Protein backbone atom coordinates (compact mmCIF):
# COMPACT_ATOMS: atom_id res chain seq x y z
CA UNK A 1 0.00 0.00 0.00
CA UNK A 2 2.78 2.33 0.98
CA UNK A 3 4.47 1.91 -2.42
CA UNK A 4 1.20 2.29 -4.33
CA UNK A 5 0.49 5.52 -2.49
CA UNK A 6 3.97 6.82 -3.32
CA UNK A 7 3.45 5.94 -6.98
CA UNK A 8 0.00 7.56 -7.00
CA UNK A 9 1.37 10.69 -5.42
CA UNK A 10 4.25 10.74 -7.89
CA UNK A 11 1.75 10.34 -10.74
CA UNK A 12 -0.23 13.33 -9.48
CA UNK A 13 2.90 15.41 -9.36
CA UNK A 14 3.80 14.37 -12.89
CA UNK A 15 0.26 15.20 -14.05
CA UNK A 16 0.48 18.57 -12.36
CA UNK A 17 3.81 19.25 -14.11
CA UNK A 18 2.24 18.20 -17.40
CA UNK A 19 -0.70 20.54 -16.82
CA UNK A 20 1.59 23.43 -15.87
CA UNK A 21 3.77 22.65 -18.87
CA UNK A 22 0.75 22.56 -21.17
CA UNK A 23 -0.52 25.83 -19.76
CA UNK A 24 2.87 27.49 -20.28
CA UNK A 25 3.09 26.08 -23.79
CA UNK A 26 -0.38 27.42 -24.46
CA UNK A 27 0.57 30.84 -23.14
CA UNK A 28 3.73 31.19 -25.21
CA UNK A 29 2.14 31.93 -28.61
CA UNK A 30 -0.09 34.57 -27.01
CA UNK A 31 2.97 36.30 -25.56
CA UNK A 32 4.69 36.19 -28.95
CA UNK A 33 1.55 37.49 -30.61
CA UNK A 34 1.39 40.53 -28.34
CA UNK A 35 5.07 41.28 -28.96
CA UNK A 36 4.56 41.33 -32.74
CA UNK A 37 5.26 44.72 -34.28
CA UNK A 38 2.05 46.42 -35.38
CA UNK A 39 3.42 49.71 -36.78
CA UNK A 40 2.72 50.55 -40.42
CA UNK A 41 4.93 52.38 -42.92
CA UNK A 42 3.97 56.06 -43.01
CA UNK A 43 3.94 56.15 -46.81
CA UNK A 44 2.43 52.70 -47.24
CA UNK A 45 5.76 51.19 -48.25
CA UNK A 46 9.14 50.85 -46.55
CA UNK A 47 11.53 53.80 -46.63
CA UNK A 48 14.46 52.98 -48.89
CA UNK A 49 18.12 52.74 -47.88
CA UNK A 50 20.22 54.20 -49.46
CA UNK A 51 18.19 57.36 -49.04
CA UNK A 52 16.88 60.00 -46.67
CA UNK A 53 14.31 59.27 -43.98
CA UNK A 54 12.36 62.21 -42.59
CA UNK A 55 12.32 62.04 -38.78
CA UNK A 56 8.63 63.02 -38.77
CA UNK A 57 7.67 60.11 -41.03
CA UNK A 58 7.94 57.46 -38.32
CA UNK A 59 5.67 54.43 -38.67
CA UNK A 60 1.96 54.86 -37.99
CA UNK A 61 0.98 53.83 -34.48
CA UNK A 62 -2.30 51.88 -34.12
CA UNK A 63 -4.72 54.12 -32.18
CA UNK A 64 -1.85 56.61 -31.81
CA UNK A 65 -0.62 54.52 -28.88
CA UNK A 66 2.69 55.36 -27.26
CA UNK A 67 5.32 52.61 -27.17
CA UNK A 68 4.71 50.98 -30.58
CA UNK A 69 6.21 53.21 -33.27
CA UNK A 70 7.38 55.94 -30.92
CA UNK A 71 8.22 56.36 -27.28
CA UNK A 72 7.58 59.98 -26.41
CA UNK A 73 7.00 61.62 -23.05
CA UNK A 74 4.07 63.70 -24.22
CA UNK A 75 0.92 62.10 -25.66
CA UNK A 76 0.25 61.92 -29.38
CA UNK A 77 -1.89 64.72 -30.76
CA UNK A 78 -3.92 65.21 -33.90
CA UNK A 79 -1.48 67.79 -35.18
CA UNK A 80 -1.68 68.89 -38.81
CA UNK A 81 1.84 67.79 -39.73
CA UNK A 82 0.99 64.10 -40.01
CA UNK A 83 -2.08 62.74 -41.75
CA UNK A 84 -2.32 59.67 -39.53
CA UNK A 85 -3.49 61.36 -36.33
CA UNK A 86 -0.48 60.36 -34.28
CA UNK A 87 1.67 63.48 -34.29
CA UNK A 88 4.09 63.89 -31.44
CA UNK A 89 6.20 67.03 -31.01
CA UNK A 90 6.36 68.12 -34.66
CA UNK A 91 6.93 71.64 -35.94
CA UNK A 92 7.78 73.56 -39.09
CA UNK A 93 11.09 75.38 -39.19
CA UNK A 94 9.43 78.72 -39.94
CA UNK A 95 11.47 81.90 -39.69
CA UNK A 96 14.53 82.20 -37.51
CA UNK A 97 16.00 78.76 -38.14
CA UNK A 98 19.55 78.92 -39.51
CA UNK A 99 22.49 76.73 -40.40
CA UNK A 100 25.65 76.79 -38.31
CA UNK A 101 26.98 79.23 -40.96
CA UNK A 102 24.08 81.56 -40.25
CA UNK A 103 22.23 80.94 -43.51
CA UNK A 104 18.42 80.74 -43.36
CA UNK A 105 16.97 77.23 -43.40
CA UNK A 106 14.07 76.41 -45.72
CA UNK A 107 11.01 77.29 -43.65
CA UNK A 108 8.77 74.45 -44.87
CA UNK A 109 10.86 71.65 -43.38
CA UNK A 110 9.29 69.66 -40.53
CA UNK A 111 11.16 68.39 -37.50
CA UNK A 112 10.61 66.52 -34.28
CA UNK A 113 11.42 68.52 -31.17
CA UNK A 114 10.84 68.76 -27.42
CA UNK A 115 12.70 65.46 -27.08
CA UNK A 116 14.04 63.71 -24.00
CA UNK A 117 16.66 61.09 -23.29
CA UNK A 118 15.36 57.55 -23.80
CA UNK A 119 12.74 58.43 -26.40
CA UNK A 120 12.71 56.54 -29.69
CA UNK A 121 11.09 56.27 -33.12
CA UNK A 122 10.61 53.30 -35.45
CA UNK A 123 10.74 53.22 -39.24
CA UNK A 124 9.99 50.29 -41.54
CA UNK A 125 12.89 50.29 -43.99
CA UNK A 126 14.20 48.28 -46.91
CA UNK A 127 17.94 48.08 -47.47
CA UNK A 128 18.11 47.83 -51.23
CA UNK A 129 21.75 46.93 -51.54
CA UNK A 130 24.11 45.19 -49.10
CA UNK A 131 27.13 47.23 -48.13
CA UNK A 132 28.86 49.67 -45.87
CA UNK A 133 26.70 52.73 -45.18
CA UNK A 134 27.53 56.14 -43.79
CA UNK A 135 24.84 57.57 -41.50
CA UNK A 136 24.21 61.28 -41.20
CA UNK A 137 21.36 63.69 -40.84
CA UNK A 138 20.07 67.18 -40.15
CA UNK A 139 20.13 68.05 -36.46
CA UNK A 140 19.94 70.86 -33.97
CA UNK A 141 21.64 69.95 -30.71
CA UNK A 142 21.30 72.48 -27.94
CA UNK A 143 23.50 70.49 -25.56
CA UNK A 144 26.94 68.92 -25.70
CA UNK A 145 27.25 65.15 -25.82
CA UNK A 146 23.77 64.34 -27.10
CA UNK A 147 23.77 60.84 -28.59
CA UNK A 148 21.61 58.86 -31.01
CA UNK A 149 21.65 55.18 -31.91
CA UNK A 150 20.40 53.43 -35.05
CA UNK A 151 19.33 49.83 -34.50
CA UNK A 152 18.25 47.49 -37.31
CA UNK A 153 18.23 44.32 -35.20
CA UNK A 154 19.54 43.48 -31.73
CA UNK A 155 22.96 42.70 -33.17
CA UNK A 156 22.91 45.22 -36.01
CA UNK A 157 23.28 48.57 -34.27
CA UNK A 158 25.53 51.61 -34.33
CA UNK A 159 25.47 51.96 -30.56
CA UNK A 160 25.39 55.54 -29.21
CA UNK A 161 26.77 58.15 -31.65
CA UNK A 162 27.63 61.57 -30.27
CA UNK A 163 25.87 64.43 -32.06
CA UNK A 164 28.05 67.56 -32.09
CA UNK A 165 26.34 70.49 -30.42
CA UNK A 166 25.17 73.40 -32.53
CA UNK A 167 24.75 75.69 -29.51
CA UNK A 168 26.91 78.79 -29.60
CA UNK A 169 27.43 78.81 -33.35
CA UNK A 170 24.99 81.67 -33.76
CA UNK A 171 24.95 83.68 -30.52
CA UNK A 172 21.84 85.70 -31.33
CA UNK A 173 19.76 82.74 -32.43
CA UNK A 174 17.72 80.46 -30.20
CA UNK A 175 20.03 77.49 -29.50
CA UNK A 176 17.39 75.00 -30.57
CA UNK A 177 17.11 76.62 -34.02
CA UNK A 178 20.69 76.29 -35.26
CA UNK A 179 21.00 73.34 -37.63
CA UNK A 180 23.84 71.27 -38.96
CA UNK A 181 23.98 68.70 -41.73
CA UNK A 182 26.22 65.73 -41.08
CA UNK A 183 26.86 63.03 -43.66
CA UNK A 184 29.31 60.84 -41.79
CA UNK A 185 28.44 60.39 -38.13
CA UNK A 186 29.29 56.70 -38.30
CA UNK A 187 29.41 53.72 -40.65
CA UNK A 188 27.58 50.40 -40.48
CA UNK A 189 27.49 47.28 -42.63
CA UNK A 190 23.91 46.54 -43.69
CA UNK A 191 22.84 43.33 -45.40
CA UNK A 192 20.08 43.77 -47.99
CA UNK A 193 16.66 43.15 -46.47
CA UNK A 194 13.68 44.45 -44.52
CA UNK A 195 14.04 45.91 -41.05
CA UNK A 196 12.25 47.98 -38.46
CA UNK A 197 14.83 50.65 -37.71
CA UNK A 198 14.81 52.14 -34.22
CA UNK A 199 16.33 55.60 -33.77
CA UNK A 200 16.83 56.25 -30.08
CA UNK A 201 17.97 59.30 -28.13
CA UNK A 202 20.58 57.62 -25.97
CA UNK A 203 21.76 60.74 -24.21
CA UNK A 204 20.70 64.35 -23.81
CA UNK A 205 17.45 66.23 -24.15
CA UNK A 206 16.35 68.98 -26.49
CA UNK A 207 17.74 67.31 -29.60
CA UNK A 208 15.79 68.42 -32.70
CA UNK A 209 15.63 65.90 -35.54
CA UNK A 210 14.83 66.76 -39.16
CA UNK A 211 16.07 63.78 -41.15
CA UNK A 212 18.48 60.86 -41.29
CA UNK A 213 20.64 60.00 -44.31
CA UNK A 214 22.03 56.64 -45.35
CA UNK A 215 24.71 56.81 -48.03
CA UNK A 216 26.46 53.81 -49.48
CA UNK A 217 30.20 54.17 -49.02
CA UNK A 218 32.05 53.60 -52.27
CA UNK A 219 35.16 51.49 -52.23
CA UNK A 220 38.35 53.58 -52.19
CA UNK A 221 40.31 53.41 -55.42
CA UNK A 222 43.19 50.97 -55.30
CA1 LIG B 1 12.01 66.53 -41.70
Image: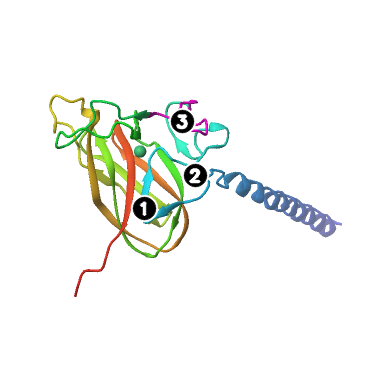
Relative to 32, 58 lies left or right: left
Count neighbours of disc 3 (C-alpha within 10 A) and say few if under 14, some if 14 to 19, many if 20 or more: many
Q: Position of residue 28 (x, y in %)?
A: 65, 50
Which mark is drawn over residue 51? 1
Please tell me which residue is depicted at 23% across the width and 43% down the height of the picture.
181
Give the CA distance from mark 3 to mark 1.
23 Å
Is the Cβ of the residue at disc 3 closer than 8 Å to that at disc 1?
Answer: no
Q: Position of residue 102 (x, y in %)?
A: 15, 33
Give the CA distance from mark 1 to mark 2.
14 Å
Q: Earlier in the sequence, mark 2 or mark 3?
A: 2
Q: Of helix, strand and loop, which one carries label 2? A: loop
Res 110 quadrant in image: top left
Which mark is drawn over residue 43? 2
Q: Of helix, strand and loop, which one carries label 3? A: loop
Look at the image and give the residue range highlighted in magenta: 76-90
Residue highlighted by disc 3: 87
Q: How is the image coloured?
A: rainbow
Camera-near label (2 vs 3) is 2
Q: Of helix, strand and loop, which one carries label 1? A: strand
In this rendered view, identify the residue nearer to me: 93 or 178. Answer: 93
Amino acid sequence: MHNRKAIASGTSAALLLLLVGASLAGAAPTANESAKYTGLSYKGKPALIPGTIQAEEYDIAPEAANGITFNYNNPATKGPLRTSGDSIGLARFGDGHVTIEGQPEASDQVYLGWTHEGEWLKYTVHVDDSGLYSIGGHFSAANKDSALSFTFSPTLTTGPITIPTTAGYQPKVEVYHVWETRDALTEINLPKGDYVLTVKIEKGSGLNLDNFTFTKVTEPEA
